[in-house]
Image (cartoon, rainbow, N blue to C red):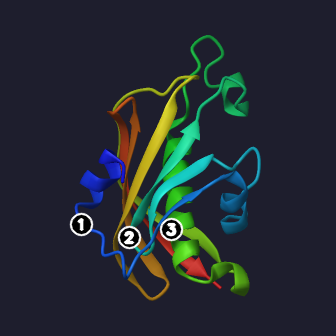
Amino acid sequence: MSGNLDTFIGAELNENEKSIQVLDINQIKDCLPHRYPMLMIDRVEDLVLGEGAVGIKNVTVNEPFFQGHFPTKPIMPGIFIVEAMGQTAGVVVAKTMPLKKNGGLVYFMSMDSVKFRKVVEPGATLRLCVRKDRSRGNVWRFSGKAYVNNSLVTEASFTAMIVL
């Protein structure tokens, strides 16, 4: 597993109970209803069912939000970084539970302790490490950290509800 998620989850993997997976963009699209321009992750690595994953977002100057945020100094809006964390968490939930078969969706309920540490510019690769803190029924609580070149750029705690 990658260093960031391994450290962030802080738990040993029991190979008999959980699996590690890498998902490409087509597999992500099978899990999430989001499409361009709102699909914010390109790849998922180190997926541990019911625990967490690392989402990858390649930030390009062609992103539609850069036209207005900001034309002379483009930076990725922080809320889109949090959205990318949420989508990574959505993949964890979708792969852990049979959402697709039941037409289920994952919705944000709350975002807490959101901190933006550094700006994210075109050309960056975001590593979005999310970990499940707890789940009860259809409500899941996650912690997330976003890194660029192993430097923390954003962190947040968020709660999501699964609606079937």
Residue under label 1, please give it: 11
Residue plotted at (56% across, 41% down): 57
**Dot 1 and dot 2 residues touching (CB under 8 Å):** yes
User: Of callouts 3 and 1, which one flags the residue occurring earlier in the amino acid sequence?
Assistant: 1
In the displayed structure, 67 sits above or below 64; it is above
Q: CA distance from mark 3 to mark 1?
A: 16 Å
Say what secondary structure mark 1 lies in.
loop
Callout 3 touching callout 2 (CB < 8 Å): yes
For the residue pair 19 and 140, the one nearer the viewer reads as 19
How far across and how far down the image is residue 160, in percent? 49, 70
Q: Tell me the kind of residue under disc 2.
A: Glu
Q: Secondary structure at mark 3?
A: helix
- Judge the density around disc 3: few (<14), some (14-19), many (≥20) Cα neighbours within 10 Å: many
Among numbered discs 3 and 2, the one appearing first in the sequence: 2
Residue under numbered circle 2? 51
Q: Quadrant of residue 51?
A: bottom left
Residue indicated by mark 3: 92
Residue 130 appearing in the image: yes
Estimate how packed mark 2 is, as few (under 14), some (14 to 19) or many (20 or more) residues with alpha carbons within 10 Å.
Answer: many
- At label 1, the amino acid type is Ala
Label count reads: 3
Quadrant where the N terminus is found in the figure: bottom left
